[in-house]
Image: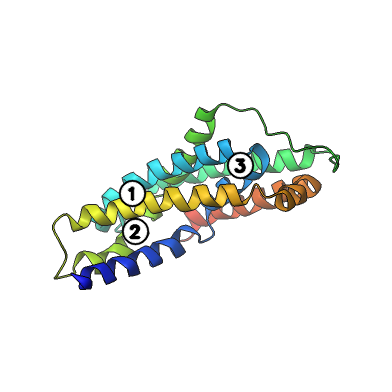
Amino acid sequence: MLGWIAEWMVFVGVMALGQFSPGPDMLLITRTALAAGWKSGCWTAIGIVCGLAFHAAVAVTGVASVLSKGGRFVIAVKWVAAIYLIWLAFQLIQSGLKSERLNVGAPVKPVEVGWGVHWRRGLLCNLLNLKVAVFLAGVTAPFLSLQSSPGGWPGLLWATIVLEGLMLWCLWVFLLQAPAIRGLYVKMAHWIDLAFGFVLLGVAIALVVLD
C-alpha cells in the first residue's frame, strides 16, 4: 500500500511544479486576478481547470499519444489557439498603451466583467492548447505503468490533476490580493499589461513556429 501512496505523492509534487510553470494559463490568471480581483481570477481558474479536465482525460486514456504525432486536425487547432492568444495579447497591449498614470492613493477598483467572460477566457486558453494534453501524457505515462497501483488508479491521477490545479491556482489568486502586490500593480498597471501582452504574443508565435 505504501508503494502507490509514495508514487502518488511524487505525482502530486510533479504536477504542482508543472501547474506553476510559466505559460498562457498562468499569465491569464495572474493578470486577471490583479486587474479584476479575486472573484474574476477564480472564475478564470475554474475555466482553465475545465479545459484541464478534458486534457487530463485525454492523457490518462492514451489519446494524447495520437495527438503527439500531429496531423491536419492538430495543426488546425494550433492555429486557432495561436489566433486566440494573439487576440488576448493585443487586448492587453492596447490596454497598456491607453492606460494613463493611475492615482496611487485610490483604492483598486475591480473591472466589472461578467463571470462567464472570465470563465470562457480561461476555458479557451487551456482547451485550445493541445500541448497541455501531450505534456500531461508524458508526465502520467510512468505512473500509469505502476505495477502495484490500486483499482481506479487512472481516475485518481485524473482527479489529482484537476483538483490540485483548482486549489493551487485559486490559492495563487488569493495571494495576489495582498495589499503590497495590488499596490504595485496600481502603480505599474500599464507596464504590466504591456509586458504580459508581449509575452503572450511570443507564446502564440512559438505555438505555431516551434514543434
Left or right of 55 on screen, residue 151:
left
Labels 3, 2: front one: 3
Q: How many marks?
A: 3
Q: Amino acid at mark 1?
A: His
Name which residue lies at 47% across and 61% down. Answer: 210
What amino acid type should be assigned to the residue bearing mark 3?
Answer: Thr
Q: Earlier in the sequence, mark 3 or mark 2?
A: 3
For label 3, the SS is helix
**Residue 50 figure quarter:** top left
- Name the foreground residue: 132 vs 206: 132
User: Looking at the rendering, in which quadrant would you find the N terminus?
Assistant: bottom left
- Residue 147 is labelled as none
Number of residues whose C-alpha sits closer than 10 Å to that of mark 1, classed few (under 14), some (14–19) or many (20 or more): many
* Label number found at residue 32: 3
Q: Is residue 4 above or below residue 78?
A: below
- Occupied quadrant, residue 62: bottom left
Marks 1 & 2, CB-CB < 8 Å contact = yes
Which residue has dot 2 on it? 136
Q: Is residue 43 left or right of residue 201?
A: left
Residue annotated with mark 1:
55
Looking at the picture, tell me which residue is in the foreground, 119 or 130. 119
Q: Amino acid at mark 2?
A: Leu
- Which SS class for mark 2? helix
Question: Residue visible at 55% across and 54% down?
Answer: 203
